[in-house]
Amino acid sequence: MLDIPTPEALATWRPWDAQEWLGRLGHDEGVTDEEYRQAAEVVASVLLDDDALRLFRE
């Protein structure tokens, strides 16, 4: 199971922290495309405002 940081922990991240974490996650051969998508959506839901999140999901 993929260890995704909690929304509370993500709220303390700077945007480049999230970018770095997602980059490492994307290179992990044990992570499926679906797990990566779910992780990216969780990160986006915390770091993006509602309009940007809507665009991310489209």
Image: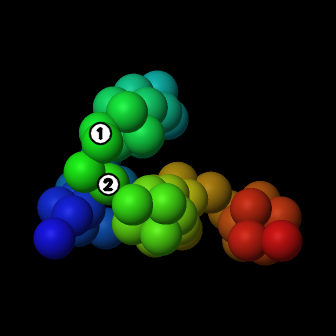
- Residue occupying image coordinates x 47% and y 69%: 34
Circle 2 is placed at which residue position? 31
Q: Is residue 2 above or below residue 19?
A: below
Is residue 29 found left or right of 48 in the rendered image? left
Image quarter where the C terminus lies is bottom right
Q: How far across and down, in percent of the image, does residue 44 sit?
A: 55, 59
* Residue 14 seen: no
Q: Are marks 1 and 2 in contact (CB under 8 Å)?
A: yes
Q: Quadrant of residue 48?
A: bottom right
Q: Residues within 10 Å of mark 1 (few under 14, many from 20)?
A: few
Please, what secondary structure does the residue beneath circle 2 have?
loop
Q: Amino acid at mark 2?
A: Val
Q: Quadrant of residue 23?
A: top left
Question: What number is the disc on residue 36?
Answer: none
- Residue occupying image coordinates x 29% and y 39%: 28
Image quarter where the N terminus lies is bottom left
Question: What number is the disc on residue 28?
Answer: 1
Q: Nearer the viewer, residue 28 or 13?
A: 28
Q: Residues within 10 Å of mark 2 (few under 14, many from 20)?
A: some
